[in-house]
Structures are given as C-alpha cells and as structure tokens.
C-alpha cells in the first residue's frame, strides 16, 4: 500500500500553506517563512498548470523552489552599506561628525563636558578653547567627541 498514491493535493492546498507560512512569518522572528511561502505559491502554480503531477514531484519542487527563493531573496534584499565602517552604519553618534556647537565653558587641558544636541558629552580638543567658541565635531571617540575650533571666515 503506497501512502502517497492515496493523497490528492490540489493547487489551492499549496496556496493555503503559503498563507499559513506568511502568518508564521509575521509572528516569528527571522525571514525564513517568507521564502517557504514563495516556494509554496510557485508549487501551487505548477500544480495549477500540470494538475496530474505526483505528490513526490510536488515535494521535490517545493524543496527546489524553497532553496531558489532563499538564494535569490538574499541576493536582491541584502543590506547595502554606504561604504563606512560597519559599526558606524545607522548609529546616532556618527551623525554628530561635522556638526557644530558653541562652548558653554572654557576647556581645561583641552577637555570640557557639555550638552551637545541633547546629550552630555566630553569634548576633547588639541588646543585650549574659550566659552562662546564655535567648535566642529571631528570624530566620536567612545563617550567623547573630538572637536576643533571653527575659524572665522574672512571676507
């Protein structure tokens, strides 16, 4: 007695499976069920076109389409960076580089603590700076900002 010969799987069975996998995709972390759902839709289309295809071939097609959708999905939806270091991508602190601020106190040995764009930072400079001096952020060094004095433009 052949178990698979008694089963009849129609195209809409595959599409229901695809819908169930989309629900799992929304409920669980990761992106694996999306690719399986795409594969189930593809097998449903194959069964719709070739209605007398054996269940074994449908399962093989599901495996092949699953692998293909995963590989193609990873290729086309991979995150593309902007060329900067991985740790700086989309970080709030890296957005401070190039911004300017006005010192609220004199630096002591080139260091002062003050609020910059709503956060408290240690500002470090290679030179002594005075209160009211406009500075530009050169780099983020841990919990400190490396700054330089903005020179007045002569006209």
Image: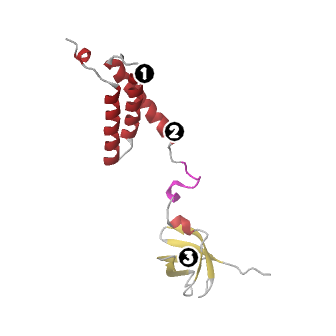
Q: Tell me whether the residue at label 1 lies in contact with that at label 3, contact meaning CB atoms closer than 8 angstroms.
A: no
Mark 1 highlights which residue? Answer: 49
Residue 155 in picture, x, y percent from top left: 80, 81
Mark 1 neighbour class, 10 Å CA radius: few under 14, some 14 to 19, many 20 or more: few
Magenta stretch: includes residue 82 = yes
Residue 28: x and y, percent? 31, 46
Q: Residue at x 58, y 53 (%)?
A: 82
Q: CA distance from mark 2 to mark 1?
A: 28 Å
Residue 16 covered by magenta stretch:
no
Tell me which label, 1 or 3, sits earlier in the chain.
1
Q: Nearer the viewer, mark 3 or mark 2?
A: 2
Note whether 82 is above or below 10 in the view shown.
Answer: below
CB under 8 Å between discs 3 and 2 = no
- Point out the residue furthest to the left here: 1
Judge from the rendering whether residue 65 lies leftward or rightward of residue 154; answer left or right.
left
In terms of secondary structure, where does tag 3 sit? strand
Magenta stretch, main secondary structure, is loop
Query: On the image, numbered disc 3 is attached to which residue?
Result: 124
Vertical placement of residue 72 versus 43, above or below: below
Q: Position of residue 131 (x, y in %)?
A: 59, 88
User: Rounded to the nearest whole Å, what is the CA distance between mark 1 and mark 3?
Assistant: 70 Å
What residue is pinned by disc 2?
Answer: 75
Q: Earlier in the sequence, mark 3 or mark 2?
A: 2
Which circle, 1 or 3, is nearer the viewer? Answer: 1
Pointer 2 and pointer 1: residues touching (CB < 8 Å)? Answer: no
Q: Secondary structure at mark 2?
A: helix
Distance of label 3 from label 2 (alpha carbons): 43 Å
The residue sitting at the top extreme is 1
Give the percent coordinates (x, y) of residue 105: 54, 87
Q: Which residues are magenta?
A: 80-89
Nearer to us in this view, 18 or 80: 18
């Amino acid at each position: 007695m052949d178990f698979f010969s008694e089963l009849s799987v129609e195209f809409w069975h595959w599409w229901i499976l695809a819908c169930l996998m989309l629900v799992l995709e929304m409920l669980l972390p990761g992106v694996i069920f999306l690719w399986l759902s795409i594969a189930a839709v593809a097998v449903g289309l194959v069964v719709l076109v070739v209605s007398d295809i054996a269940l074994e071939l449908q399962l093989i097609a599901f495996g092949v389409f699953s692998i293909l959708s995963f590989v193609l999905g990873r290729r086309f939806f991979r995150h593309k960076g902007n060329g900067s270091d991985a740790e700086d991508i989309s970080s709030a602190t890296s957005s401070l580089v190039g911004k300017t601020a006005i010192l609220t106190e004199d630096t002591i040995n080139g260091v002062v603590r003050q609020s910059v764009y709503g956060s408290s930072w240690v500002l470090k400079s290679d030179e002594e700076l005075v209160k009211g001096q406009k500075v530009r952020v050169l780099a983020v060094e841990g919990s400190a900002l490396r700054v330089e004095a903005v020179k007045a433009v002569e006209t």
